[in-house]
Image: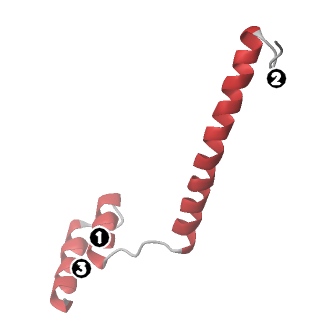
Amino acid sequence: MNVVGGGGIGGVLVSILGLLGWLLIPVGIVLVIAGLIRYFWPREDDPRTILQRRYAAGDISKSEYEEMLRDLEGKS
């Protein structure tokens, strides 16, 4: 009996590669859609989170961080 892909180890490899292809295509589509959603509709962070990130990255000093944090707390 002939199988599409041949017999032996070659046929097994072709079958495995075909199965992987069918599994990876939907996963790739989902990842592309998720990336597009994040690109066109970015998550808006609250000002405190942005301030914490800037301080953690070293963009601002501790005194600047504390001053800006007081300003934010006074406005909320």
Give the mark nearer the N terminus: 2 vs 1: 2
**Residue at 66% in and 24% down:** 16
User: How many marks are shown on the rendered structure?
Assistant: 3
In the displayed structure image, the side of residue 10 where residue 19 appears, left or right: left
**Residue at 83% in and 15% down:** 2
Which image quadrant: the C terminus? bottom left
Rounded to the nearest whole Å, what is the CA distance between mark 3 and mark 2? 68 Å
**In the figure, residue 32 lies in which quadrant?**
bottom right
Rounded to the nearest whole Å, what is the CA distance between mark 1 and mark 3? 12 Å
- Which class describes the residues within 10 Å of circle 2: few (<14), some (14-19), or many (20+)? few
- Note whether 72 is above or below 5 in the view shown: below
Residue designated by label 2: 4
Give the mark nearer the N terminus: 3 vs 2: 2
Q: Where is residue 48 in the image (x, y as percent from the top left)?
A: 26, 74
- Note whether 20 is above or below 74 in the view shown: above
Per the image, label 1 sits on a secondary structure element best described as helix
Q: What residue type is labelled 1?
A: Thr
What's the coloring here?
secondary structure
Residue designated by label 3: 68
- Number of the label disc, if any, that sits on residue 49: 1
Callout 2–callout 1 Cβ contact below 8 Å: no
User: Which mark is in front, 2 or 1?
Assistant: 2
Per the image, label 2 sits on a secondary structure element best described as loop
Q: Position of residue 15 (x, y in %)?
A: 70, 24
Q: Which amino acid does label 3 sit on?
A: Met
Q: Which is nearer the eye, 37 or 20? A: 20
| Residue reaching furthest to the front | 1
Give the mark nearer the N terminus: 1 vs 3: 1
Q: Which is nearer the eye, 23 or 33? A: 23
- Number of the label disc, if any, that sits on residue 61: none
Q: Which is nearer the eye, 42 or 19? A: 19
